[in-house]
Amino acid sequence: MVSDAQRELWTIERLRAEADQLEFEMMRDIADDWEASLKAVQESADAKIAVILDQHRRQDMSTLRRRTAMAANDVQHGGDHYKTKAIQPWDFIVSNNIGFLEGNAIKYLCRWRDKGGIQDLEKARHYIDKLIEVERAKAEGPIWPWSK
């Protein structure tokens, strides 16, 4: 036979077990909430870090490009006939606001000994002939009705 004291002890043990279970569930819920909050904070921090790293990466790439970029005068395709000049023809042409036809004549005159020989002199003369033709036409006025 079970005494009243024994029943009361079992009831207390059962209540303690239920309380322990409730406390465990509450602690688990709190831990889950903390974990979710921590995860949200971590994701936010990761996003901010990613933005900052991306900005730094872009700045670093921009700086690297600027530091390693070669000037157009440092590169020449198809020979070195301009690199040997004290002043490269295109620098002279740009600095003096020289037009297309005159600029091409200068280019061929500067390189003829080092690259194209007589053919470059003929090319220079061709540009000079075209320049003379254009300037004469300007002085004489338009020949065709559509060139007014």
Image (cartoon, helix red, strand yellow):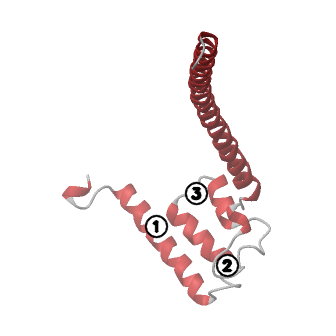
Q: For mark 3, what is the residue?
A: 98
Question: x, y (%) of residue 89?
Answer: 67, 66
Name the foreground residue: 78 vs 120. Answer: 78
* Mark 2 or 1, nearer chain start: 2
Name the foreground residue: 93 vs 52. Answer: 52
Tell me the SS state at disc 3.
loop
Question: x, y (%) of residue 27?
Answer: 62, 23
Tell me the SS state at disc 2.
helix
- Please report the residue visible at 72 percent of the width from the left and 79 percent of the height from the top: 80
Q: Amino acid at mark 1?
A: Ile
- Please report the residue visible at 75 percent of the width from the left and 59 percent of the height from the top: 68
Q: Amino acid at mark 3?
A: Ile
Q: Residue furthest bottom?
A: 118
Label drawn at residue 111: 2
Q: For mark 1, what is the residue?
A: 132
Name the foreground residue: 13 vs 56. Answer: 13
How far apart are the alpha carbons under marks 2 and 1?
22 Å
